[in-house]
Amino acid sequence: MLDNSAMAAAIRSAIEDSKLTQKGIADAFGVTEQAVSGWLRTGKVDKRKLPKLAQLTGKPLSHFGMGSASESVSTPATSHSYVRVQQLDGEVDMGDGRINDDFPDIVRAMDFAPTYIRSIVGFVPPPGRLVLVTGRGDSMIPVINPGESLMVDTGVTAFDGDGIYLLNTGNGQQVKALQDRGDAVYVVSANTTLYPAFPMPRNTVIGGKVYLRNRIDRFN
């Protein structure tokens, strides 16, 4: 894999040579233009997206530093009969924040019926948009208990109405509720005694909207 600066340059040149727009790339991946701009600015892109990016831009995988078979990554699948969701080994904190690697390793892929995904998320997202992570900490008890599996829609990178989000306010990845209280959007914990609500900082990065699988079944 290339380092971040080299990856940013590789992505930029691939998009420019293909004559595709950032909006076209964003629509193909089911993400926002802001997310694609982030790839171009930082070079931080999930390696699972690179095969599809190579296909879209007409570049070989070697252009993105993935020259060997051992580095190739299969694209997560979505079909009429199932939706494939990757479970990541990274943890998200429900307390003060937990630091993970930029791209945690994949533990395994799980296939779900589209009706099951629709019952949780409300629709069937494009391939690769949903991931499973594990919550740790006590700030969201009893809404979310430590060790429970959370389904994250990574296509949501901005406040999308009151709900539970994966975010980073500057102290690592966290799972918190966001609520619009009129004067501001607040970061809210279920355990308000230990974790009082506070206005969402301007530099907050939203990594996805969280859906609770524990309302239907337990993963662990």
Image: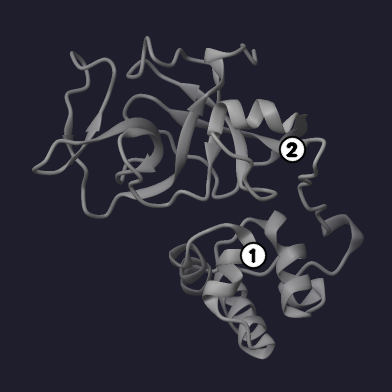
Instruction: Say which residue appears at 74% left-offset and 38% top-offset.
Output: 83
Instruction: Say which residue appears at 42% left-offset and 52% top-offset.
Output: 157
Q: How many marks?
A: 2
x and y, in percent, of residue 61 in the image = 80, 71
x and y, in percent, of residue 214 in the image = 54, 14
Q: Quadrant of the C terminus?
A: top right
Q: Quadrant of the N terminus?
A: bottom right
Element type at marker 1? helix
Instruction: Say which residue appears at 74% left-offset and 29% top-offset.
Output: 112
Quadrant housing residue 203: bottom left
Looking at the image, do the residues carrying marks 2 and 1 touch, with CB atoms under 8 Å apart? Answer: no
Residue 153 as seen in the image, left or right of residue 199: right
Q: Nearer the viewer, residue 138 or 28?
A: 28
Residue 107 as seen in the image, left or right of residue 189: right
Which residue corresponds to mark 2?
A: 83
* Sequence-wise first label, 2 or 1: 1
Residue 28: image tag: 1
- CA gap between label 2 and label 1 equals 17 Å
Disc 1 marks a residue whose amino acid type is Ala
x and y, in percent, of residue 204 in the image = 30, 49
- Looking at this view, name the residue that lies furthest to the left: 183
